Amino acid sequence: MNKLTFLGVAGLAWTVATPAFAADLPMAVKSPAPFATRFTWTGCYGGGHVGAAFQRHDATDPVLLIQDNLGGPGTTVGTTTAKVSTTDVALGGQLGCDYQFSPNWVVGIEGAASAGVVDGHKTVGLPAGNPGYSALVTVSTDLMTAITGRLGYAVDRWMFYGKGGVAWTNDKYSITGTFAGTPFDAEGLGAWRTGWTAGAGVEWAFADDWSVRLEYDYYDFGTPVVNMIDTGNGFMGPVAYRQSTQTVKLGVNFHVWGAQ
């Protein structure tokens, strides 16, 4: 075999053997991509909210207070309830902290306050007086506050939650008008009333540090008795005010120490 023939055979053998040899080599393994950080609701936050407050105040018995003090004891027959209903603005803020565990549940605590609630009015007749005599019952709520716990279920950046706790409200009351030619103005300060609240909502973390929420809350402040005082006519007397409030609020929060 001459030299050229030998080189030709060797080249052909190399051509055939190379693919088989390469097939036996181990495949190159790519480095695994780093795991993405899982979002968590653990951390603290603060923010603001705006919404609507639907209030109901049932005053019992403003007619008895006026007629029996200006017309004499026993003037009033029966019981009268003035139902004062208002639709108001709820504007305020909230602060809280959450902890996510196990692995989708979230537990937290929050303090919130809402102001900007306007007066509500209800006119009731004074049947013992001349036709057309009436009393104007006015209730105003300056501020509502609450401290609540909440339990939520997180689906990544979405959280569905329920909440409940203790609530406080600061109200003012007045009953004004004219009876038998005598003007009257009975005022009452409810000071801080204590009640309870419960609600539910959904919150979405649209960025690592920001979230937006939609929430419904119900407040109940019972039926405390308020001592109404008319300094001009020199009389006083009790009126019971049954109060409940429903709110729908849209809020935004800035989160600190949350996961990225």
Image (spheres, rainbow, N blue to C red):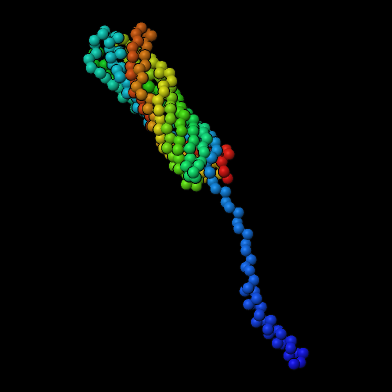
Q: Above or below — where is 60 with respect to 38? A: above
Q: Above or below — where is 157 with respect to 112? A: below
For residue 121, say whether it is visible: no
Q: Residue furthest left?
A: 77
Query: Is 258 placed left or right of 68 in the picture?
Result: right
Picture residue at 24% right of the left edge, 10% below the top: 74
Query: Is 35 placed left or right of 219 in the picture?
Result: right
Residue 10 picture location, percent across and down: 71, 85
Picture residue at 69% right of the left edge, 81% below the top: 14
Query: Is 95 placed left or right of 133 in the picture?
Result: right
Snapshot quadrant of residue 7: bottom right
Snapshot quadrant of residue 116: top left
**Is 194 in front, or is 8?**
8
Picture residue at 33% right of the left edge, 12% below the top: 237
Q: Residue furthest bottom?
A: 1
Residue 207 picture location, percent across and down: 54, 44
Residue 230 picture location, percent across and down: 36, 11
**Is 247 in front, or is 13?**
13
Picture residue at 58% right of the left edge, 39% below the top: 257
Locate the N terminus by quadrant: bottom right
Residue 211 picture location, percent across and down: 51, 41
For residue 152, say whether it is visible: yes
**Is 197 in front, or is 233?**
197
